[in-house]
Amino acid sequence: PELCAVFHCRGCWTVLGDSLQLCAPEAPRLDFLACFKVTSDVIWEDSPLIGLEEPLLGCAYNALSCRSCGLSVGFILHSAASDLAHFRGLFCFFKDRILCYLLKNQMVIEASKVDFPAVTLKK
């Protein structure tokens, strides 16, 4: 718990989740954080979408957004290629759409600038 953080919406600062529920992606090319749980301020679309661009090309997912301001903050994968299959059913936040409040030093930093410890999801 050296790096405990609260995840906030970049648009309105609503709390969306925290690092205690985090499963950091192992692949550096992925620009999102995956969580087991999120707050009730994260809502998702009922209708699934199909990704037309990388990294979600050909994947079926539901879009996640902030209940307070409506900003699109991520997705929940339902169908994916083998390299993303271990993220199915998790709440994935785009790093460029969230801010992290680091509890230890009480500062806010962009999620893309934080290196969370890796968690092995494939097992």
Image: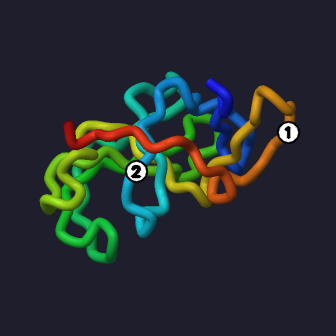
Crowding around mark 1 (Cα neighbors within 10 Å: few <14, some 14 to 19, many 20+) is few
C-alpha span from label 1 to label 2: 23 Å
In front here: 63 or 4? 4
Q: How many marks?
A: 2
SS label for mark 2 = loop
Residue 31 visible (yes or no): yes
What label sits on residue 25 in the rendered view?
2
Residue 97 is drawn in which quadrant?
Answer: bottom right
The residue lying at 45 percent from left, 44 percent from top is 118
Left or right: where 85 falls relative to 68: left
Q: Position of residue 57 (x, y in %)?
A: 24, 72
Q: Is residue 77 above or below residue 8?
A: below
Left or right: where 103 falls relative to 80: right
Q: Position of residue 122 (x, y in %)?
A: 22, 43
Name the colouring of the figure. Answer: rainbow
Left or right: where 54 falls relative to 117: left
Residue assigned mark 1: 107
The residue lying at 81 percent from left, 43 percent from top is 108
Quadrant of the snapshot with the C terminus: top left
Residue 49 is drawn in which quadrant?
Answer: bottom left
Q: Amino acid at mark 1?
A: Met
In front here: 102 or 88? 102
Q: Is residue 49 above or below residue 68?
A: below
SS label for mark 1 = strand
The residue lying at 67 percent from left, 38 percent from top is 8
What label sits on residue 54 in the rendered view?
none
